[in-house]
Structures are given as C-alpha cells and as structure tokens.
Image: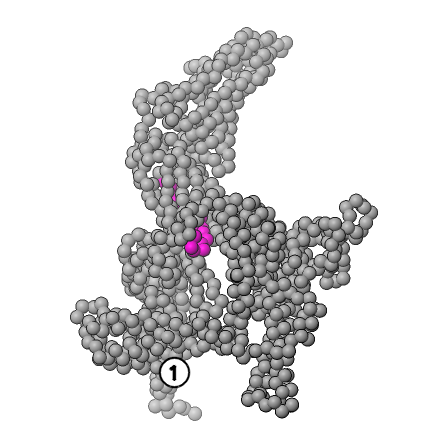
Amino acid sequence: MTMPRPLSLLLLFFLTVVCTTAQSVRWQPAGGILERGQSTDLVLIFENCLPRGDVELPPVSNLVLGPPQQSNQTSSSIINGKISSRRLLFLSYAVRPQEGDEVVIPAFTVATDSGDFTVPTARFEVREATVGDTNIPVAQVAQSRLDLAADSLWAGQVIPVDYRLEVSARFRAQLGGEPEWAPSPLVVEAWNEPTRESTGIGGDARNVLTYSTRGYISRPGTYVIPSVQQLVNIGVPTAGFLQTLRAEQYAITSDSPQLTVRPLPTPAPATFAGAVGEFQLTSRVVPETAEVGEPVTWTLELTGTGNWPDIPGLPARQASNTFRVVQPDAKREIPEGRLFEGSITEDVVLIPTQAGDFELGPVTWTYFDPLTGSYQSVSTPATTLTVTASRTAPPPPVTSASSGTTSPRDEGGGPLTVTARPAPESPSAIPLAAIPGAAASPRPLSTARTLTVVVALIALFPAFWLGLSSQHARRHDAGRPARLARRRLHKTLTAIKGLHGTAQHAQLLSWQQDSAALWQRSAATPLNHLFGGDEQWVRLWREAERAMYAEAARLPEDWPARAQQALANKRAPRFPWHHMLSPRHLFPVLAAAIALLSTDLPAQGIQAYERGDFAGAEAEWRTALAAEPTDWIAHHNLALALAQQNRWEEAGAHATVAFVQHPRNPSTRWHLAYTLDRSGYTPPVIGEFITPRWSHRVAQLASPGEWRLLLLGGVALGVLGMILLLLNAYGCRVPGWRFLSWCLGLTSVAVMAAALFSIQIWGTTADHRAALTWQAGELRSIPTDLNSEQQTTPLAAGSLCHVEKAFLGWRQISFPNGQTGWVREEVLVPLWQ
C-alpha cells in the first residue's frame, strides 16, 4: 500500500520541525557587576550542541578562572502543535576579578559537534566587594600587609619578612588556603607556622595572623616587592528559622612595598666569593702524626647564616706535591625549611709518600658582614703534620706538571632549587571562636521523677501558651519582611500612577527595594538570579532602572498596570504555623531565665583565651563547670582551650558533651566533627549525628533533657484534654469542648511520639547518669590498683556508660550489655552531673 503524496509531505514537514532546533554557545550572565576579590560563578552554556574536546578560554589578565564544573539539562515542549527539545550543557567557572575597573572576556571560537560557534564578548564592571548583605567593604573587615625589616639593604643581605593578616573579630572567618605569593626577585624560605593574636577591644577587636620568613636579593637596584594574596572565608548570617552562617570567599591582597638594594663596597678582597652574612670556618687534621702511606684527613667546615644559595663552595687549599690526593666530596647540609642556615663540610684525604714535617694551612675565606658594612676574613690556623718512615715503600706520588697546588673540587654553584609545597584546596581546620557567656542545659529527669511529675500534672494552659508562642514566632518569622514589603508595594504603585518624570524616581527606588524584599533577595543580587527567572519582573526592573538612570528616558505608560499584575501573581510567603511549636518560641521564658542565672565567670576565660593563655582559660572554664556541669558553653569553650594545647582526646569528650547538651548550635556541631576527627575515637550514638539521617535531624532539634520536658508537656496536654471530656460528662459545658479535646489529644500524641522517638535516638546519652571515657584504659573488677590478680579488660576511649556509684576516687560504671566495672574518676567526663 502506497502512502498518498500529500500525506508524505505533511509527515516530512512535521519531522523537520521536530528535529530542527537552534544551537548556540554563550556566557550567562554576559555582563553585569563583579566584586573585586570575591569568587563568582560564570556559566558557559552550550545549547543543543556539545564541545569537541577541552574548551580553551582566552586569557584575561585581571581575572582568575577556576576549573570548570559540568552539568546537563534536557527539556521538551509543545508550542502551537510543534514539538521541540532543548539540550543544555553548562560549564560553570569560579571567577575572581583582580585589579582594574572592568573585566572583558574577548570573543572566541569554540568547536562543537554542530560546527564552530563564536562566543560573544562579555563585559563586567568591577566594584569593591562588600561582606554579604551588610554593605560593609571587605577592606574594613579583612586587610593584610607585607612588612620588610628594612627598606634599604645590601645585596645578598638576609632580612626578616612578615606577612600580617587582620580580620575583624565581629565576623567568623577561616583561611581559604595558604598565602599566594610570587616573591621574585626575593629569594625566600617557606613561611613559618603562623602566630595568632588578638588586638583591640569591643567593635575594634581584630584577630591577627602573622606569617614569617626571611629573604634576600642578590643584585643591587630598586625593586617593588609583589603583593601577597590570601583567600579568606568570611561567615555571613543567613535568614531563616535556624539561622546559620554562609561562608563567602574573598581574596585579600597586601601592599607592595619598595625595597632598595645597595651594591657591596668595591674593591672586594680577592678571597671574597659572594657570601653575605655571618660565618665561621674551622679546620681539622686527623691524625696529626702518621706514617708514610697512612691516609690523613684534612677537614674544612663552613657554618653560619647568610645567602647560602649564592655560596659556591670552600676555598682551595695548598698542600705539598709529595702527597697523593683523593678528590674531596663536599657535603652541603641545609636544615629543612631553613634556606639561609647551613654548613659545607669538605674532606681532603692526603696520603704521604715521604717522611718529614708538613704544614697544612692556614686557609683564609672572606665574607661581607651587613651589620658592620665591611668585609670580614676568617682564617684557620696552620697545622703541622708529622710523617714518619714506613717499612713498606709507598708508590710514587702523582703531581701536577704545572703546579704543586691541590685544588679541591668546588661544589656545584648556582642558586639552590627550592621545591614549593602546593597549596591545599582548603585550609586545615582550626578551632572557631570561643562562645561568650554561660548557658546551662537541663538535666534529664530520672524515670521515677518523670512518672511522679506526670501523675502530679492536673492542668495546663496550652492555648495561652501556644498563643504567646505564635506571637513570638510571628515577630521572628523570616517571611515577615516579605509580607510587609508586599503591602508597601501596593501603596508605592498607587503613588507612581499620579507622578511623572523625575518625580517618580524616589518611588521607583522604593519599589526596587521592596521587590527585592518580597523575593527575599538582596537588592545587590545579579538580575538573572534576583527574580528566579521570572521574565515579567526582570522586564519591570530593567524599565525602572532605565527610567531612573538613562538620559531622557521615561517610564512606559502601562508600567504601573503591569507592575500591579505582577504583584498580584506573586504571593508573599505565608506564616508557617508549625513554627510556633519550635523550642525557641515555646521556651523563651526558660531561655531568659537561664541567661539571667548565668554568671560572668566565663568572661574571664574568654579574655584569657583571646590573650593566648589557653591554660588559664582552661582553668576558668573548669571552675565554671564545677559550679554548673550543664553549662554547654563552658564545655564548648573548654574543648577549644584543650584543642589549642593539642590535648585532642579530652577536647573531643567536652565537645561531645557540649553537642549533647545543645545540639542546635552550629558551633557545637562543627567542633564535634572537628575534634573527633583528631581525637582518634567516635562515641557510640554520637557518630550518627556527624552525617545525620532524617531521624537524627529530628532528634537534634532538642537535647535529651529538653525532649524529656517536651514529653511531660505532651502528657500535660493529654491530661487537659481528658479533663475537658470529664467536665462535659458531669454537665459543665465548655464552649467548643469537642474541638479543644481533639486538638489537645492529637497534639499530645504528636509531641509525646516525637519526644519518645528522639529519646530513643539519643540512647545512652538521654540518661542523667551518662558519662564518656576520654582516655583509653582498663576496666577493673574491684576499685584498686594494688591487686594485680584481679580480672581486667581494655576500655576504649569514647565509650558511653552509666555511672552507678563512687568510691574513693573510683567510679563504678555499667554498659548497655550489662557489663560493670571500676575506673578512675579522671578518665570520665559526665554528660549531665
């Protein structure tokens, strides 16, 4: 059967429409604003095509590009009966602008499976970076400088070089890598381990990190030393129910000091070989009395501090041509990480061929002393070698026809090659800042006491409580600014309708600020991300900007109507009613009471910690814990002080206790993983919270003690619901009693189920007797060290147990499997007592 010709043509046309799609390669965004020193993602989009091989971008002198990250997206659509598919490949580059006010990525050609495409030029304006949404310039938060010990020095003189990074203590910051520095023409050592200190007080307090090294320049002249660049991750608070810190990375660039290098005085002595610094030369002859044919070792050793990479070797030595000479093997020793301290040792083996007295030395060597500004010569004293006859005649000496001088082989000259260690992708973790103040976490009640309280509860006032919690949650709701902004936008658009020309500018600026607030974005957010791809809002924003800033531009007449329509389509986030059940809204009175009961004692620990007196800070926080064992801040800060002293095992235990007592705090969660990674153990139960599943995320919304209180609250709600039923049964009608009873009953069940589930997740830690072993040891049958015949078993660090009883510095502990035994009190860190 043959298909009719018209139908065949229609089918061919349909297939052509389906398969034909547009291809392009472009930047997204193709322009806009970049902040100097801050990393931003630029995406190279391949639409309906794929690159053939690696994509080579044109070089941009003032732009640092990271390696590309690849992702894909495929979509299909039917428009007017036509089926079209769209295939996108994204190459995302992390870019960081440097000097200059503009970054231009030139147009370039890229080969794809659909042919060659030209990527259009991308232009970006470069502005000074600000920290997050604070509008505070980065230069006010973090700055650095390069300090040279002198601005004028002699050629080859080694001087100290310090790199100093200062960060405001108001912001939590971490290093994003090692300092990046191309020091040429300086020849330098590797950076020493940085020192840390704090300066200033209050809002002017700054954390200072100082790197030190040494360097020199061998050629005279005037030089501008290149700047040092360091990546710093600065924590910026984020909005939301549980406020966290978002790390934003900035490149902090130091100054470029000028250095004048003076030439050495002329004329230089003949024995000067280019050494600058302070040196000592010694000579040894072993033995000083020998027989003919017996080897004699003549050793020269040069030690000191100076420009060792430019020192070629030791001076030549004079010896009688009656000696047979074994070619010397010079040995240069440079301590690891110390380029300008070292020694050269050279052994010459002399074999005498005839008896007699021979004088070895003296040897003179000259260096330039930069402290005195003059040449200094060091000489070794002459040594007399006595050679006696031997019974066996030695072989004839080998002499030089031209000279009787023995010239030891010089060690290879030239500058010493320094192999630099590559910078890591991210810095090694260090403890975060100490938390000021004190805060006690509630102890878990015993089972008997819990049951007693349950029986004793007769009535509560949940409606009043939830009403207060709702008001508190509304005041602190992250969506509230968006709702308020939406109300203001209605008034602003009404006002714009009655204005014309420049009179509209103030209202348009208000419209932009409130629009950004409605979309819960910063007004500084790039336009393509500001409205989540909503083209209607993007168009309105661009028309408003053109009306305000373009010359002789006016706002379109239909702009207010289109803005009203866009506003009607955009809803502000509704108030999340479940937030009123959040612990921070249900227990504000409890939190305030805990704050009032806190003492000022830990402030002394903070001061000692910031001075670098970690032992003193440790003593203060131990005193605070002796007064209140449930002070989770004291546990947290004590873990920091111990970590600074490299006492990781005990630091891990206190970080674990701080997390159990207050698991919602971001710092306790961070330091838990940080200290346990270095302590060498992970306690049972706690390890699941480091990479939590959904069940552990629910459990860490409150501490075990708080879940016990929530369990009591759930029981109280259930009791109140049953009281309403009893009142109705006895004829005391309460308006809406049926609805209230159902609400109280369901809420009670939900709260009790969540509390019981979370208490099970916390396991052993939910018991008020829980303790943690921070040190490996032995579990003993009886509380004594004297009886060596008693049964013992190894006790691992990080074991969770219950403390049953105490006896003269010993504690009897038990484990979930029924095992009991005795350990010393010092190896335990109680979780609650």
Is residue 23 visible in the rendered structure shown here?
no
Assess whether residue 170 is covered by the magenta stretch: yes
* Colour scheme: one colour
Q: Is residue 611 left or right of residue 704?
A: left
Is residue 358 visible in the rendered structure shown here?
yes
Q: Quadrant of residue 182?
A: top left
> Compared to 674, does 21 lie above or below?
below
Amino acid on which disc 1 is placed? Ile
Position in image of residue 347 (x %, y %): 52, 22
Assess whether residue 247 is covered by the magenta stretch: no
> Compared to 154, does 524 lie above or below?
below
**Residue under the point 37% across and 69% down:** 521
* Residues shaded magenta: 169-184
> Which residue is more in the foreground, 17 or 198?
198
Q: Is residue 80 left or right of residue 628?
A: left
**Residue under the point 63% across and 83% down:** 723
What main secondary structure does the magenta stretch of the protein show? loop
> Compared to 325, does 775 lie above or below?
below
Assess disc 1: are there few (<14), some (14-19) or many (≥20) residues with their C-alpha within 10 Å of its C-alpha: few
Q: Secondary structure at mark 1?
A: strand
**Residue under the point 50% across and 23% down:** 301
> Compared to 644, does 379 lie above or below?
above
Q: Mark 1 sits on what residue?
A: 78
> Which residue is more in the foreground, 755 or 721?
721
Q: Quadrant of residue 292?
A: top right
